[in-house]
Amino acid sequence: MAVWKARLAGAEVKIHDVDHEPAQCHVFLSGRSIRVDLFTLAVMNPPPHDLPPRLRRALAQRRVEMLEAWEKVRIIPPGSSPGVW
């Protein structure tokens, strides 16, 4: 389930309600799932190494809102999975 979601620049963007560090969102674009660091907007799982410029701008404009949503995420402890804890 998502704690935050939006449609930005033609992509679906979600922040899951249970996830692991670092702060990240999941971008679904052209049938691919891309993890993006919320602080740097760097792609965490290449390829691709870059986001389309229009999408990067949209993410940057909503970054504060997404970081606030990240504060509500239940963090998975390192080395475990949601079913374990």
Image: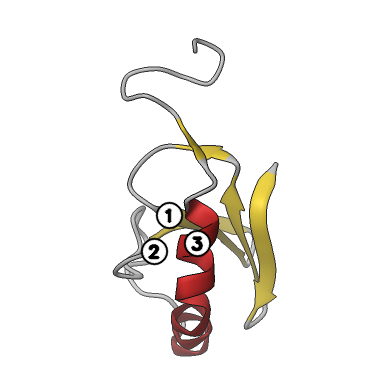
Q: Using the image as rendered, state which of residue 19 and residue 28 is in the foreground.
A: 19
Q: Position of residue 50 (x, y in %)?
A: 35, 74
Q: Which mark is residue 68?
A: 3
Q: What's the residue at 36%, 53% (across, down)?
A: 45
Give the CA separation, mark 1 to mark 2.
Answer: 5 Å
Q: Position of residue 61 (x, y in %)?
A: 49, 85
Circle 2 residue: 38
Q: Position of residue 16 (x, y in %)?
A: 59, 46
SS at badge 3: helix
Type of amino acid under label 2: Leu
SS at badge 2: loop
Marks 3 & 2, CB-CB < 8 Å contact: no
User: Could you tell which of marks 1 and 3 lies nearer the N-terminus?
Assistant: 1
* Left/right of residue 14 with respect to residue 59 in the rendered view: right
Circle 1 residue: 24
Type of amino acid under label 3: Glu
Label 1 Cα neighbours within 10 Å, binned few <14 / some 14-19 / many ≥20 = many
User: Could you tell which of marks 1 and 2 lies nearer the N-terminus?
Assistant: 1
